[in-house]
Amino acid sequence: MDTESLKTAICRSVELRRNDFTAISHDLYLHPETALQEQRSSEVLCRFLEREGFQVKRGLAEMETAFTATYGNAGPAIAILAEMDALPELGHACGHNIIAAAALGAAAVLREVLPEDAVRLTVMGTPAEEQGIGKIELIKAGFFDSIEFAMMVHPSSRRYVTKAYLGLARLRFVFHGRPAHASAYPEEGINALDGVIQTFNAINALRQQVPQDVRIHGIITDGGAAPNIIPARASCSFYVRAAELDRVHAMVQRVIACAQGAATATGSRLEVEEDPRIMAPFRINQAYADLYAKQLELLGLAEDVVAVDRNCGSSDIGNVSQIVPTIHPHVPIGSGINIHSSSFAEATVSLQGDQAVLEGACALAMTAADLVCDPAYRRRIAEEFTKN
């Protein structure tokens, strides 16, 4: 197959079908659904893919809204990931409507231009990214076992190809004390809330002696019933992040030690709950990233100069990147706006937001075309992944 002709056909198709693809983004924006509740969103995506000739399977890994849509029977196994969940109250303030629309757009045009014996293409509907659940559960259930290359785009205030993501572990501490009248019989009580407060104080002290990439942040989830009742129960939740998975595990133990010390100091009893679903740091594959960057050059789109470790969050895409070569480039929807804000949600359906859908669909499909047509690209990416 002639790669240049394929890419020309891809760009032409994306432009001709721009309204089809941006309509998906707008539909999800108007009907936002939170993690694991994306029934309508998932069905919108599945029905579109069925109309495009994909074989769709719903309800995967014990998640109603997870799905796969497949096309082709030979060639490289490429997965395009479609996130779909929104944030509580803020709607699509992380832009998953754009992610899904770009993924479906890329898949649709690839199916138009590639014969069945050229590619094994999977669109993977991955719910609950905001909770760091969907991709981890799909990995555990084996849905990535046969995938060779994974890709997706994410909206941003900038355009860039590579970005670091921190590993993340989640902890919940529940302190149990003894209630008493806070004024009449304070000596009879054991204040569970003091355990929570001392945990925060100890963690604040710990932050002075941790590496620069470590982030520890938490909230009080239960602080008692009334000021005149010594709290018999109080709880708090923390996220622990770091650039390396070993460091995440080490910092988790230090944070737990802070809570254990607080329990000892206050005489309360401590329950520790660790979520076993730990989000892994993102593993950058430079050869793969360079291939996507090549498509931006062909499209005449300039990357923004941004340090890869600037403004790092976490995502379950990191877990995918640990087991299969993965790219997660960002497409711009407007400068000066940050994710998880109402202004970001509104920007996803602006003219620039619509253009981001088309850019993502086109660049992802062009990248996939190179993977299909040139085994040298596949070899370089695989070799880097194996070495690192």
Image (spheres, rainbow, N blue to C red):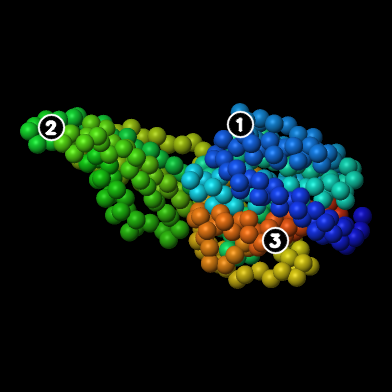
Residue at 35% across, 46% down: 219
Estimate the x, y position of residue 60 in percent, counting from the top left: 66, 31
The tag on residue 181 is 2
Distance from label 1 to label 3 (Cα)? 31 Å
Rendered-image quadrant of the N terminus: bottom right
Earlier along the polypeptide chain: callout 1 or callout 2?
1
- Where does label 1 land, which residue? 63
Q: In this view, does 131 lie to the left or right of 177?
A: right
Say if 16 sits above or below 183 in the image.
below
Mark 3: give few (<14), some (14-19) or many (20+) Cα within 10 Å. some
Estimate the x, y position of residue 333 in percent, counting from the top left: 62, 62
Q: In this view, does 69 lie to the left or right of 204?
A: right
The nearer-to-camera label among 2 and 3 is 3
**Residue 328 shows in the view:** no
Distance from label 2 to label 3 (Cα)? 62 Å
- Where does label 3 land, which residue? 355
The nearer-to-camera label among 1 and 2 is 2
Q: Which amino acid does label 2 sit on?
A: His
Residue at 52% across, 51% down: 314
The nearer-to-camera label among 1 and 3 is 3
Q: Is residue 48 left or right of residue 201?
A: right
Mark 1: give few (<14), some (14-19) or many (20+) Cα within 10 Å. some
**Residue 342 shows in the view:** yes
Q: What residue type is labelled 1?
A: Met
- The local secondary structure at tag 2 comes to loop
